[in-house]
């Protein structure tokens, strides 16, 4: 957001769940450091199923961007009511998006943004990554998202750790040591996999812009790629 419009104003609307609060905490910590202002900040009860009034409040505040962080089906309701009330797609930035979410945001959400750790539309996919996408699409009639990629890649990571130290297969301490010593890459995207002295992996995220949405998937283009050291944001303090 800072790159697109310095000193911009962000409307932050999110559900009162642990994940959403954690994402909001990180954004509230990072925004002032980037010269961004959050106004308004609206938090919904966990059982929310309507955001008509709140969407009107967002529009009245005239933000440059809106960050909606809904939970489950409410995420679709929240997004569509923002569009209904007059927020433009290119103003909407979702912190995360999986295939089913993007499809439910609908065709008119083309132009909006979402964060992800893997996407079938990425240009940098490896040969294995492209094969994984096509096989998944054939079996499930939709492209995979970062959740399915995590599951696929994790099996390969475990296999590499055990191949380097077979005794780690049935020894918790040895397995932990084998994992911490890994210096490899995700087989689907080529993203590095290494861990620091605290056992944390360098964080990263792609920011995609939706080009089109249809019944079986969507087209999106990578707009930004972000990396940050796990020590940058004081996660454990922010979520207290």
Image: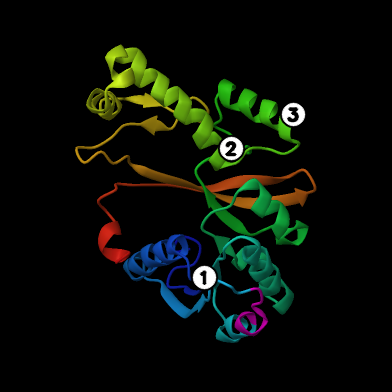
Q: CA distance from mark 2 to mark 1?
A: 28 Å
The mark closer to the camera, 2 or 3, is: 3
Numbered badge on residue 156: none
Residue 190 vertical position relative to residue 35 in the rendered view, above or below: above
Picture residue at 77% right of the left edge, 43% below the top: 216
Q: Is residue 234 visible?
A: no
x and y, in percent, of residue 51 in the image? 64, 78
Picture residue at 54% right of the left edge, 35% below the top: 149
In this picture, residue 116 sits left or right of residue 100: left
Q: Residue furthest left?
A: 197
The mark closer to the camera, 2 or 1, is: 1
Q: CA distance from mark 2 to mark 3?
A: 18 Å
Q: Is residue 197 visible?
A: yes
x and y, in percent, of residue 140 in the image? 72, 35
Q: Residue furthest front?
A: 170
Reading the chain from its start, which is encountered first: label 2 or label 1?
A: 1
* Element marked by disc 1: strand
The residue tagged 1 is: 14
The residue tagged 2 is: 122
x and y, in percent, of residue 219 in the image? 70, 45
Along the line of sight, the residue nearer the viewer: 164 or 92:
164
The residue tagged 3 is: 138
Picture residue at 50% right of the left edge, 79% below the top: 42
Q: Residue furthest right?
A: 215
Residue range of the region highlighted in magenta in the rendering: 49-55
């Amino acid at each position: 957001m800072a790159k697109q419009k310095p000193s911009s104003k962000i409307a932050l609307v999110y559900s009162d769940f642990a994940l959403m609060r954690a994402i909001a905490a990180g954004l509230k910590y990072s925004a002032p450091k980037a010269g961004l202002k959050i106004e308004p900040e609206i938090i919904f009860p966990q059982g929310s199923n309507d955001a008509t009034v709140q969407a009107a409040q967002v529009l009245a505040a005239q933000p440059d961007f809106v960050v909606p962080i809904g939970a489950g089906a409410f995420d679709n309701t929240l997004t569509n009511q923002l569009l209904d009330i007059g927020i433009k797609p290119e103003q909407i930035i979702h912190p995360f998006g999986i295939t089913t979410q993007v499809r439910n945001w609908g065709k008119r959400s083309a132009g909006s943004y979402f964060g992800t750790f893997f996407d079938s539309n990425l240009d940098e996919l490896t040969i294995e990554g492209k094969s994984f996408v096509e096989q998944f699409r054939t079996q499930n009639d939709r492209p995979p998202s970062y959740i399915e990629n995590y599951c696929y890649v994790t099996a390969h990571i475990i296999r590499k750790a055990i191949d380097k130290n077979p005794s780690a297969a049935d020894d918790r301490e040895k397995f932990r040591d084998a994992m911490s010593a890994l210096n490899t890459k995700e087989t689907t995207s080529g993203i590095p996999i290494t861990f620091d002295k605290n056992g944390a992996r360098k964080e990263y995220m792609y920011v995609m812009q939706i080009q089109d949405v249809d019944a079986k998937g969507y087209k999106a283009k990578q707009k930004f790629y972000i990396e940050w050291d796990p020590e940058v944001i004081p996660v454990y303090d922010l979520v207290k």
